[in-house]
Structure formats: structure tokens, C-alpha cells
């Protein structure tokens, strides 16, 4: 294979970003082609590289960047089935996002900088995927972090965007510090930062601190892939533009942590303790995020918590020792989650609000956005995990991996002995994943039913539903005042149909959402590209997982029908029809009253809506003490240190004034003082 091809995959989007920044403001007409073409060509080249590499093949090439006096840093490329598969996903999603953004942000004056950052973001993820050296991988890892900061804060005029971007940056950096030490320790133990050398050292048992290394790396993974306890930044990141959410959640930033653990899984298999920690982290993340998703009113926050939970599935598969199942679900999830976010953007464009309660008040919303309606239905079925969509096969692969690990027969596929995976890790993942399957089906069904199928007569005005809630436009209540909400500025005219650039990417992504799952059924298809293990679901987990998903859907449907009937019966007259809520800060959305989430969660609804108070806990334990320390430092600097500085300056000035009194300019005075001094010295010497 010509090494120029894989080298061009990350290079082209980076060059496109530089070109867009250079000429985008002076020639706005060039910004769109400069944004789309390099990324699209990279996607094609990634596919060509994957085809040329074939199945079961590995390509390693490197050149030394600089001597370090220790482990060398190399510009290295490592290509295998995992990097090929994920690079194709990154290219596909990034191309769809760039095309979609040309219409979604068509009137945005900062579109050139936005497009450049998306291209740079894509290039950084390609670098992470193709890198064969941990230090070079770290460069792409950190570039994604800074790009996410700017993209989430794209609408910096709003307080939500500013605080969300800062929170994302700080929380992920909190994980990156131990992650950096983990990479240094790993390189020191292995004697090299080359990934192939690290894996060889792990296989030979030459790593002296495998548990410490794995735990340090997991801190960075928890931050990047939004796993408990560093998951809190991702729901707030919904303040950024919707296409950015699709890119972050589907194929770049949050996928990087999972990909890194998959690449370095032989290192983690050396530490049973680290695998149990990863399993517990995944379990808490899965269940907690699913409960939170069931209580959200903001459409994008529902999807954000969904992403957190699905990443927990992937982490659970890794804790069970099966990276094939994890990456299978990563790619499957990347397709349907990108589709969900882009479809959500179309719905938000038409409804002028993120609030699903407000959407329930808009008559015929699903008829206004038929493409988004049907593709979102497809993606939600895949998220639930019902056959024959891709989410079913990848979710069942995760459950099967956990089942084998729980039985002491972990599917490590030759990366390590099955006994290296504690059975406890398998049981933790299996039980939590089963419960999450039920909750996922419930919140997905709730979202679809409330947003698109609520009878408009079932919505309650403020006066009838919540005393003390301020009225919005036309006397209709704002969305529930205690509901977390992350709006973005919306200047679109809801009366205008969405342009083709916002519609055809939905159907492009619907294809892998529906059909990618079958690639894991035959051993000479997807498994041959990866480690060669089986990705077929076992009969027990297939029946159990599908049954739990069906139960979740039925529970949500039953609760929705019951709540809708109660609300409809309690109203003397239908609510106002035909109004499209307007958005200005907090939108003119209506309070959800026919919400199945309230009935299903009961007393947990309030805590789940606010993330079980994790943000408040962190604010009390970390944010407020740090702010207090900062105020103390500012006081000491301004009132103590600067007082001494000003005092030394004032003392020198006073001394100068005193000395200046003796400078009269009279020579006779100077001679008299000199003579007096001589006499005084003579007397002192004589005495």
C-alpha cells in the first residue's frame, strides 16, 4: 500500500481547515466547498485504505520524530481492521455533518470558522485512529478537546454556550492529567511509546505497573467518553449547534476513549482490578444515564444522556474482555446516533424549540417533517435494539460478551486468557446492561410518542397545570421551569421546508442504521476484519434483551396512554391550536402533563431530571472551594503582596524627597558640610 493514502486521510481535513480560515471571511462563497470537499475526499480515501488493507492484515510504518534520551517519539501509522472500520465511520459522519451544516448554519456569520473547526476536529480524530504512537495519539486527543471547546461555545453570545464550553474543557482536562501520566508510565515500562511495542511488552508480561497504568488511562477515558464520574459535561454540551452534537456523539470525541481502551485492551487484561473498576463505571453510567434520559424535556438532552448510556455499553463490553463487541456497537451507535441528532435538528428547525412538551402542542408536526419523522423512528428502533436493525445485533453482542465473562469464558479472542477477566465484571455488566435495555426502550418510546403523537387536546395551559408558572406567548406556560434546557439561537422560518442538504444526509445514515448489523452474522465478514471471534448473539441474551426492550416499549406506551387519557378527561376545552412556539432564551413551550416518564419514575423523576444532583455535589465539593481559594489568592495578591510592592515604592520615593532637601545648589553649603564631615572624622579617629 502506498503510505501517502493513509497519510492524506488526516492531512486533507487539516489543510481544508487552514484554507477555510484563510479565505472564508474574505470569500464566503469558498467556505462551503472548502469545508465539504477535503472531508469527503478523506472519507473516500479512508474507504480505499480499508479495502486495500483487507481483512486480517496489519500495516505499521514509522519515522523517528525526535530523540528524547528515553523512549523515542515516532510519527507512526498503525492500520488494522479496527482503524479501518472506525475511520470509515468518521469520514461518513463528518461528511454528512459538513453538508448538513451548510443549510443549518446558512445565515451564520461565523460559519467559516465553524466549518474550519469541524474539519480540524475530523482531522484530529483521524490522527487518533491511525496513530501508531501514543504521544502522536495524544496530540490528536488534545486537539479534539480544544476544538470541542470552541464548537460547543459557537454561540458565545449566550450564557449557556459559554458555560457549557468551559465546563466541557475543564472536566475533560481533569481526566487528561492522570491520562498523561498513564501514557508516560506506560511508555517507561514498555521502553517505547509505539503501540505495537507496548502491546508486545504487555503480551510478554514486561509491564511493571499494569493496574496503576490502566487506572490512570481510565481517568482520561472517563472524561473523554463521558463516563461516570466525569460524564456531567456532555448533556450541557447541547448548547452547541446540533450538527456539532452529531459529530461529537457519533464519531469523534466520545468515541476516542472507547477506541483507545480497545486498542490497548491487552494492557487492561493484565489487571483484573482495573476491569472491575471499568465494569462498575460502565454499570453506573448505563443505569444512571438511562434514568436521566427518561426525565428530560429537552430533546437534545435526551439524546445526550442516551449517548452516555450507550458508551457505557461499549465500556461494559471492554470490561468483559471483548473489544470486537465494543467496536461493533461503537460503529452501529455512531450511525444511528448521528441520524438521531441530525433528524432532531430538522425537528427543532420546524418546531422552533428543543422542548418535547412544546412539540406535543404543535398539530401535525410529523407531517411537516416527514423525512425526520421516519428516519428518527428508524434510529430510535435501532437504539431500542429491536431486530433487524443494527442496534439489535451490536447490543446483543455486548450482552453475549458479558454473559460469557460471567460464566468465566470471556471472549478475549486471543488477546489474553479468559481467566484474566473477573467473573464479577461480567455479572455487573450483564445485569446493568439488561436493566438499561428496558430503560432505553422506555425513554426512546416516550420521546417518540410525546413529541409526535400526543393529542393536542392533551396539553394543559399554565393556569390549569402549574400554579405560579409564568405565562409565555398567548398566555401559554413556558416549559417546565425546573427542567434543564440547552437552547441554541434559531433564526429559521418554521414555515419554510428544510432544504435538501438537511434531508438527504438523514437517508444516507439510515442505510447503515438499518443494514450494518448483518455484517456481524458471518465469520468472514465483520469478525474477519477485527479479531476473528464470533459476533452472533446467543439465544439466551437475544431473547432476554429483546424481551426487555419490548417490555420497556409497552410500559412507556401504557403509561403514555393512561396519562393522556387522564389529562384529556380533565380539560373542559382543547388548548389553542396552530401556534408555533417562539424561541427567545427560555422558549414558549408547554408543561408536559401527559408524560409517561413521571408515572414510570415516580419519586425518582425529580432527581433524575437534574442528574441525581451530581452537578450540585461537584459544585459544593470542588467548584465553590476552588472559587473561594481563588478569591483568597486575589485578596492576598491585591491587599498583601501589592501593599508591600507599593510600600517599597513609597519608601524609595520618601527617601528621595529627604535626600533632595540637601541638594540646594549652593557650593558654600556643600563645602561647609564637607569641612564638618572632615572635622567629625578627625575627632572620631583621635578619640
Image: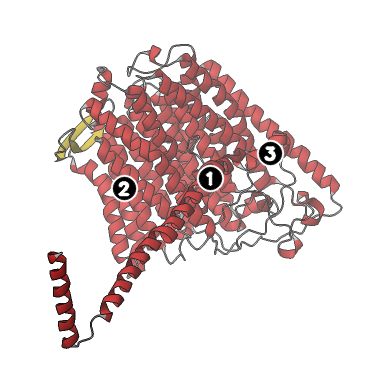
> How far is mark 3 from mark 1, CA to CA?
17 Å
Give the structural element (helix, strand or loop) at label 3: helix
Nearest to N terminus: mark 2 or mark 3: 2
Residue carrying label 2: 123
Label 3 crowd bin: few (<14), some (14–19), many (20+), radius 10 Å: many
Q: Residue 621 appears at what percent x and percent y? A: 53, 41
Label 2 crowd bin: few (<14), some (14–19), many (20+), radius 10 Å: many
CB under 8 Å between discs 3 and 1: no
CB under 8 Å between discs 2 and 3: no
Rendered view: 24 above or below 264:
below
Residue 606 or 113: which is nearer the viewer? 606
Give the structural element (helix, strand or loop) at label 1: helix
Residue carrying label 1: 235
| Quadrant including the C terminus | bottom left
Rendered view: 468 above or below 557:
below
Q: Residue 472 appears at what percent x and percent y? A: 71, 62
Q: Is residue 243 visible?
A: no
Q: Toward which corner of the image does residue 447 lie, by quadrant?
A: top right
Residue 225 or 98: which is nearer the viewer? 225
Residue at the (46%, 59%) spot, across then down? 103
Nearest to N terminus: mark 1 or mark 2: 2
Residue carrying label 3: 605
Rendered view: 439 above or below 476:
above
Tag of residue 572? none
> How far is mark 2 from mark 3, CA to CA?
41 Å
The label nearer to you, 2 versus 3, is: 3
The label nearer to you, 1 versus 2, is: 1
Residue 487 or 219: which is nearer the viewer? 219
Give the structural element (helix, strand or loop) at label 2: helix
Amino acid at each position: 500500500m502506498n503510505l501517502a493514502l493513509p497519510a492524506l486521510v488526516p492531512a486533507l481535513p487539516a489543510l481544508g481547515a487552514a484554507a477555510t480560515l484563510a479565505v472564508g471571511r474574505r470569500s464566503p462563497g469558498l467556505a462551503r466547498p472548502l469545508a465539504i470537499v477535503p472531508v469527503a475526499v478523506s472519507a473516500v480515501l479512508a474507504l480505499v485504505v480499508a479495502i486495500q488493507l483487507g481483512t486480517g492484515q496489519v500495516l505499521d510504518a514509522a519515522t523517528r520524530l525526535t530523540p528524547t534520551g528515553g523512549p523515542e517519539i515516532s510519527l507512526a501509522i498503525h492500520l488494522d481492521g479496527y482503524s479501518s472500520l472506525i475511520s470509515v465511520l468518521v469520514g461518513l459522519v463528518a461528511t454528512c455533518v459538513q453538508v448538513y451544516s451548510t443549510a443549518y448554519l446558512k445565515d451564520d456569520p461565523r460559519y467559516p470558522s465553524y466549518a474550519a473547526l469541524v474539519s480540524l476536529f475530523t482531522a484530529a480524530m483521524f490522527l487518533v485512529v491511525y496513530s501508531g504512537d501514543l504521544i502522536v495519539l495524544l496530540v490528536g486527543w488534545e486537539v479534539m478537546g480544544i476544538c470541542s471547546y470552541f464548537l460547543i461555545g459557537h454561540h458565545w453570545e449566550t450564557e449557556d454556550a459559554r458555560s457549557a464550553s468551559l465546563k466541557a474543557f475543564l472536566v475533560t482536562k481533569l481526566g487528561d492529567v492522570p491520562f498523561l501520566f498513564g501514557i508516560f508510565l506506560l511508555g517507561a515500562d514498555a521502553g517505547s511509546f509505539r503501540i505495537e511495542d507496548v502491546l508486545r511488552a504487555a503480551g510478554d508480561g514486561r509491564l511493571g505497573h499494569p493496574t496503576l497504568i490502566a487506572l490512570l488511562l481510565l481517568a482520561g477515558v472517563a472524561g473523554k467518553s463521558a463516563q461516570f464520574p466525569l460524564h456531567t459535561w456532555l448533556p450541557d454540551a447541547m448548547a452547541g449547534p446540533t450538527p456539532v452534537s452529531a459529530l461529537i456523539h457519533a464519531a469523534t470525541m466520545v468515541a476516542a476513549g472507547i477506541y483507545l481502551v480497545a486498542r490497548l485492551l491487552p494492557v487492561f487484561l493484565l489487571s483484573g482490578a482495573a476491569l472491575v473498576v471499568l465494569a462498575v463505571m460502565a454499570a453506573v453510567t448505563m443505569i444512571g444515564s438511562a434514568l436521566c434520559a427518561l426525565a428530560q424535556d429537552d430533546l437534545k438532552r435526551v439524546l445526550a444522556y442516551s449517548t452516555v448510556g450507550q458508551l457505557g455499553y461499549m465500556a461494559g463490553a471492554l470490561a468483559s474482555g471483548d473489544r470486537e463487541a465494543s467496536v461493533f456497537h461503537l460503529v452501529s451507535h455512531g450511525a444511528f446516533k448521528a441520524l438521531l441528532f441530525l433528524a432532531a435538528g430538522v425537528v427543532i428547525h420546524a418546531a422552533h424549540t428543543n422542548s418535547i412538551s412544546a412539540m406535543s402542542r404543535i398539530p401535525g408536526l410529523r407531517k411537516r417533517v416527514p423525512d425526520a419523522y421516519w428516519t428518527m423512528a428508524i434510529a430510535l428502533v435501532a437504539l431500542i435494539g429491536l431486530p433487524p436493525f443494527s442496534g439489535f445485533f451490536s447490543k446483543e453482542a455486548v450482552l453475549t460478551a458479558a454473559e460469557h465473562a460471567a460464566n468465566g469464558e470471556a471472549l478475549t479472542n486471543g488477546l489474553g486468557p479468559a481467566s484474566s477477566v473477573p467473573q464479577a465484571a461480567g455479572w455487573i455488566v450483564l445485569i446493568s446492561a439488561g436493566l438499561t435495555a428496558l430503560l432505553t426502550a422506555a425513554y426512546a418510546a416516550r420521546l417518540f410518542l410525546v413529541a409526535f403523537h400526543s393529542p393536542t387536546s392533551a396539553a394543559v395551559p399554565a393556569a390549569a397545570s402549574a400554579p405560579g408558572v409564568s405565562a409565555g406567548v398567548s398566555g401559554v406556560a413556558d416549559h417546565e421551569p425546573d427542567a434543564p434546557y440547552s437552547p441554541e439561537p434559531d433564526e429559521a422560518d418554521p414555515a419554510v421546508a428544510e432544504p435538501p442538504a438537511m434531508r438527504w444526509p438523514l437517508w444516507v445514515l439510515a442505510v447503515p442504521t438499518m443494514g450494518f448489523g448483518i455484517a456481524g452474522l458471518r465469520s468472514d465478514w465483520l469478525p474477519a476484519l477485527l479479531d476473528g471471534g464470533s459476533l452472533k448473539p446467543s439465544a439466551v441474551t437475544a431473547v432476554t434483551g429483546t424481551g426487555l426492550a419490548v417490555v420497556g416499549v409497552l410500559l412507556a406506551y401504557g403509561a403514555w396512554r393512561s396519562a393522556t387519557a387522564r389529562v384529556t378527561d380533565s380539560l373542559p376545552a382543547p388548548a389553542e391550536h396552530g401556534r408555533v412556539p417562539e424561541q427567545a432564551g427560555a422558549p414558549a413551550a408547554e408543561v408536559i402533563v401527559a408524560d409517561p416518564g413521571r408515572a414510570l419514575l415516580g419519586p425518582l423523576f425529580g432527581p433524575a431530571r437534574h442528574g441525581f444532583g451530581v452537578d450540585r455535589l461537584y459544585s459544593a465539593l470542588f467548584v465553590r472551594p476552588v472559587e473561594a481559594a481563588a478569591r483568597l489568592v486575589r485578596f492576598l495578591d491585591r491587599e498583601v503582596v501589592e501593599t508591600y510592592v507599593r510600600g517599597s515604592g513609597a519608601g524609595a520615593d520618601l527617601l528621595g524627597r529627604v535626600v533632595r532637601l540637601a541638594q540646594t545648589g549652593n557650593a558654600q553649603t556643600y563645602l561647609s558640610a564637607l569641612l564638618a564631615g572632615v572635622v567629625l572624622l578627625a575627632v572620631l579617629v583621635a578619640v
